[in-house]
Image (tube, rainbow, N blue to C red):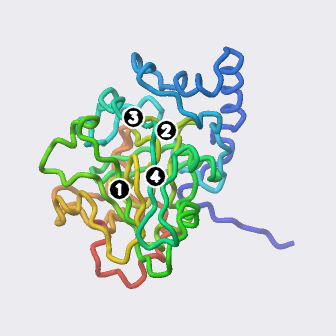
Amino acid sequence: MAMLIRNKRRWEIAEREATPEAAFLDRRQILAAAGLGAVGLGAAALPLGVTGRAAAQEADPTADLYPAKRNGKFTLDRGLTPEEINAHYNNFYEFSTDKELADAAQRLRTRPWQVKFDGLVEAEKTVDIDTLIRAMPLEERLYRHRCVEAWSMTVPWTGFPLAALVAYAKPLAAAKYVRMETFLDADMAPGQNQPWYPWPYIEGLTMAEATNDLAFMVTGAYGKPVMKQMGAPLRLATPWKYGFKSIKSIVRFSFVEERPVGLWEALQSSEYGFWANVNPEVPHPRWSQAEERVLHTGERVPTLLFNGYAEEVAGLYKGLENEPLYM
């Protein structure tokens, strides 16, 4: 009898190690029994330690959609970073350059929120965020997150494939890139008063990158709507790239022919470029990328090419070997 041998991928864990779906469902039932419906869930689900902000966290009209069913295709080779750590270690320069910006980010007003689709599309349109979220197939994925600053975390994101959003936008064949833009409101986000940053935050992907299965639009995390400091109500997750590519709080998707210039590339192109693919062999001009510090353990581990997702994305970059993929 022939024996089927399956080689385990580096980022996979045994199914028994993943948080069971029932655990999330039980949590919803407990909240319901306590008299907390969809509105109450949005406020009650604030992470432990984030006290005194529930009043500032407006009710999320899509809270009834969480937790979403986990897609078992996307698992990890290490444990999830505790929510408490992820809730208090964020880059969101619109509000502060300090990692402990969770309180400052509560100024972000996530409703009403409109998302515009323009450029090379069949028809330009603007849609309410809640309408958009309910039109998409939500699922949970466990992803690595690697910052260009050489630290890493793991996150249970909820959302939908960016490919589904591209299909929704109906781009024309001439579109080569997706340009994404965040909000611009210096009264709400004091960091946008800093003149040396070229606000608003811009990022972009090739159409091939945007329609790769790993590219993910995030609307939630840890079984509930995504927190403000993590980029509510809509952010990008591209786990094979450095974190600055995963733009937060998006308000506009433009389909264009010319390659977009992101905020960090515009600010310092010698250190931050368009591709931003995780590459341990190529250092940042000011530090090595050969290792990363895992936030919830403090352990230093070797950095993997494409952050461990080479099998899924390496084919996107054939013929680009001479470009600085790390930048």
Identify the amino acid type marked 1: Glu
Identify the amino acid type marked 4: Val
Task: Specify whether residue 49 is in view.
Answer: no
132 vs 97, nearest the viewer: 132
25 w.r.t. 201: above or below? above
Question: What x and y, as percent, mark residue 44?
Answer: 54, 21
The span from disc 1 to disc 2 (Cα, nearest Å) is 18 Å
Q: Residue at x 38, y 36 (%)?
A: 229
306 vs 124, nearest the viewer: 124
Identify the amino acid type marked 2: Val
Q: Which residue is mark 3?
A: 109
Q: Residue furthest left?
A: 196
Question: Are the residues flagged by discs 2 and 4 in contact, CB closer than 8 Å?
Answer: no
Identify the disc placed on residue 115. 4
Identify the amino acid type marked 3: Arg
Can you tell which of label 1 and label 2 is closer to the viewer?
1
Q: Residue at x 72, y 67 (%)?
A: 5
Q: Which residue is mark 2?
A: 226
Using a 10 Å C-alpha cutoff, classify the residue at mark 2 as few (fewer than 14 neighbours), some (14 to 19) or many (20 or more): many
Can you tell which of label 1 and label 4 is closer to the viewer?
4
Q: How many marks?
A: 4
The span from disc 1 to disc 3 (Cα, nearest Å) is 16 Å
- Secondary structure state at the residue bearing disc 1: strand
- Secondary structure state at the residue bearing disc 4: strand
The span from disc 1 to disc 4 (Cα, nearest Å) is 10 Å
